[in-house]
Image (tube, helix red, strand yellow):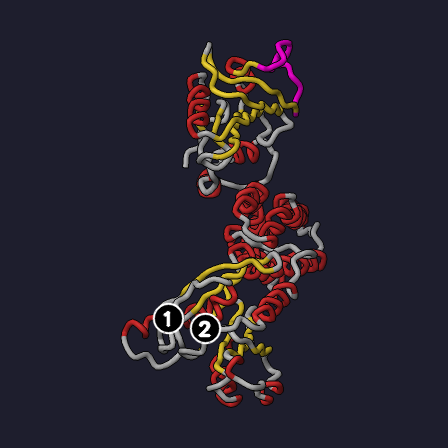
Amino acid sequence: MKFPQTSDTICALSTAPGTGAIAVIRLSGTKAFQVIRDIFQPADDKLDIQTAPSHTIHYGIIGTGATILDEVLVSLFRVPHSYTGEDVVEISCHGSVYIQQKIIELLLTHGLRLAGPGEFTLRAFINGKFDLSQAEAVADLIASHSGSAHELAIRQMRGNFSRKIKHLRQQLVEFTSLIELELDFSEEHLEFADRKNLYDLLVRIRTELEQLVDSFRFGNVIKNGIPVAIIGKPNVGKSTLLNAILNEEKAIVSEFPGTTRDAIEDTIIIAGYNFRFIDTAGLRAAEDAIETIGIERTWEKIHEATIILYVFDVTEQSFQDVMNATEEFKELATDKSKHLILIGNKTDKLQELPKGFKNFVEYETIFVSGKRRENIHLIADSLQKVVQNADISDRTIVSNTRHFEALQNALSAIISVDDGLQMKISPDLLTTDIRKALYHLGEITGEITTDEILGTIFSRFCIGK
């Protein structure tokens, strides 16, 4: 992607397209105040908009000549105290699509250019208002649909993650400078960098990088929704349970086994966390090709899920049946990133709960009636506990795929440095791997970047942000 000139002045609608109560049109660049003076008539005749102080709002009419387009509020933000680090003007007008279009047309006739996707934030990055990871957090903040995703984005936008990466990078920079100094005195065989100190530093950095890399699995599901697979034999009430959890008739319910032949998904927010529920085809020997595909997809969803709800019919399946059925999930259940919860369904058909299940302590077991929607809240409570056990409040969580890949590459380079120290290789080979680690850490914050990386990142933003 070739980036447009940042010396011109841009404009765009910053609120969502369509009709609303109000709309906000943003201008940024050197001509912002000049153009707004030409098209805006403040209610205060004595006001000169070009000399008005920053962070003030002014009421008046906007238009050209005798043509009045709207009564508006104009907000002023002077360089460098603005979102982009440039002169910024925001026009708050009525939300008519016609008014929005006519104001933007008026701005274009005065020499402004329509902004590209993410161009306001790109200018903020170029002008040093954000580093690259903070700029990406702006898009994550806009896209957040739950309290936990919002919290992750806010913390990243405020620089929590950036500060950790910059600290790691600075430690490596200081040490690699000493090693490179050794190269200048290679004939004297001097060591300016104490190898034990370097090794201790590498252990600390490697540990931190491993923790950040490991956090991505959790951060990614927080950002995109925690996948919960509802599995079990046919006709145990999986679709009924999904409808009960969502409190709507999302899935088709039938007394005939095998009704669900493909995965059905929907989301619900519980205690600020976005859970993505997946109702799957029943696990049994398939009777036709279509059902075979559905069961194959069920196993795919089981492997993708963070939480697995195994539903069984308490009137049909004995304690031993459930134990035998869960044997095939042993391997998945031992994965620390996954949680298996047993759901005994159709309790409305029983006089009392079977006592044998009370001793089934290996997995948490919840008894419900999906049909009567009884004890469904216990499932929500259990899901909430699972994610709250992985509290995000006191640690740095990686939720961005680009950051994850860069951290993996940096970790690989640090491991190579570690191996090199053990083998007592020459300083020039050590610095090669250290510089690789520095490069990949710099990719995260934008200290090292390319137009291709920037193009990929900012093309995902909406126009006007």
Q: Is residue 52 magenta?
A: yes
Give percent across and percent down for residue 150. Answer: 60, 49
Q: Is residue 410 above or below residue 240?
A: above
Residue at 50% x, 15% y: name it: 39
Q: Is residue 234 above or below residue 415?
A: below
In which quadrant is the N terminus drawn?
top left
| Residue 85 seen in the current view | yes
Query: Which element is circle 1 on?
Result: loop
Residues at badges 1 and 2 in contact (C-beta under 8 Å)? yes
Lower sequence index among marks 1 and 2 = 2
How many discs appear?
2
* Label 1 CA crowd tier, 10 Å (few <14, some 14–19, many 20+): many
Q: Is residue 42 above or below residue 10?
A: above
Residue at 44% x, 62% y: name it: 265
Q: Is residue 175 above or below residue 11?
A: below
What residue would you read off at disc 2? Answer: 238
Give percent across and percent down for residue 45. Answer: 62, 10
Q: Magenta stretch?
A: 42-55
Query: Which element is circle 2 on?
Result: helix
Disc marking residue 260: 1
| Residue 175 seen in the current view | no
Residue at 60% x, 89% y: name it: 355
Residue at 61% x, 34% y: name it: 129
The image quadrant that residue 132 belongs to is top right
By secondary structure, the bulk of the magenta-drawn segment is best described as loop
Question: What residue type is disc 2 on?
Answer: Lys
Give percent across and percent down for residue 11. Answer: 48, 26
Give percent across and percent down for residue 84. Answer: 57, 30
